[in-house]
Image (spheres, helix red, strand yellow):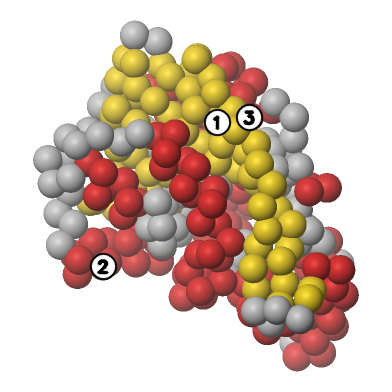
Amino acid sequence: MHAKLQRRIQRYGWDKAVEHYDDGWRESLREAQTHLLQMSAARPGEHVLDIACGTGLVTFPLADAVGPTGRIVATDISQKMVDHVAGQASQRGYGQIEAFRADAESLEGLDDAQFDLVTCALGLMYVPEPLEAMKQVTRLLKPGGRAVFAVWGARKNCGWADIFPIVDARVETDVCPMFFRLGTGDVMAMEMEQAGLGSLETVRFQTSLPFESDEAAVEAAFIGGPVALAYDRFDTATRDSAHAEYIASIAPFRSSEGYKIPGEFVVVRGEKDR
């Protein structure tokens, strides 16, 4: 798929998902985001760029860490995600947060060497050209600055992964054709090194994604994530068949207490040379 079209699908897909994202994914993503924040080690007064900020699940903890003397720039491909973060920042009194829409590979509006830390929590999988995004990160970091990226791990370790072929079988989307590539083996660390980052540290871990019911699992997968734009085009019969197929795919992970769907995350930390 042409990168421009893929970005367009991502942009409007996440616009559709914004109202459902927190309810669907907050608990499931908490462990990955906690690892990323710990490895980021943001300090008071630092300047931080949070790429693919989404609804701000990492942005606001970073703002707490840098405090009122720090600065947080939050970017996302979705205007509605950015508007959500900006609105929450205003309501909650986070004057150190500014948010604007930007593609991860196109951050030319930001000056070189201005950030102490750049983060991207579970966003690089959707970027058509992640290496270009990483090169932008290297450009924007101060000498000695840190970059910390989290992605989903290997497909075989993510029990929800059938959502992509289930949707693609009903409407041609190719919403993220290489979704699991960066989480396979050492691919992300190697690309970070290629982009000019060193002192790399990788953490890979398995977890489980909790959903209380069929309805909660379906809403997160179809409405609160990247396939939301394609799903919006389904008629009732198509939705029902897609739901049934997805529930069948995750049936092995259901118990009397709901679902615990296996997942894997990879978090990599790197530094720019001093």
Q: Residue furthest bottom?
A: 236
From what the image shows, is residue 229 above or below residue 159?
A: below
Residue 123 location (% of width, % of height):
54, 47
Q: Residue furthest top?
A: 274
From what the image shows, is residue 177 above or below residue 209?
A: above
Residue 198 location (% of width, % of height):
50, 14
Q: Residue at x 69, y 47 (%)?
A: 206
Left-right relation of 265 to 165: left
Q: Residues within 10 Å of mark 2 (few under 14, many from 20)?
A: few
Residue 60 location (% of width, % of height):
31, 54
Q: Which of marks 3 and 1 precedes in the sequence?
A: 3
Residue ID for mark 3: 188
Where residue 8 sits, quadrant-wise, is bottom right
Q: Residue at x 38, y 58 (%)?
A: 56
Evaluate if marks 3 and 2 touch, with contact meaning CB atoms under 8 Å apart. Answer: no
Residue ID for mark 2: 87
Q: Secondary structure at mark 1?
A: strand
From what the image shows, is residue 127 above or below residue 268?
A: below
Q: Residue furthest front?
A: 256
Where residue 182 sits, quadrant-wise, is top right
Q: Secondary structure at mark 2?
A: helix
Residue ID for mark 1: 268
Residue 16 showing in the rendered view: no
Q: Nearer the viewer, mark 1 or mark 2?
A: 1
Evaluate if marks 1 and 3 touch, with contact meaning CB atoms under 8 Å apart. Answer: yes
Give the CA separation, mark 3 to mark 2.
33 Å
Q: Nearer the viewer, mark 3 or mark 2?
A: 3
Give the CA separation, mark 1 to mark 3.
7 Å
Q: Residue at x 54, y 48 (%)?
A: 32
From what the image shows, is residue 42 above or below residue 141?
A: below
- Name the one closer to the observer, 102 or 28: 28
Q: Residues within 10 Å of mark 3 (few under 14, many from 20)?
A: many
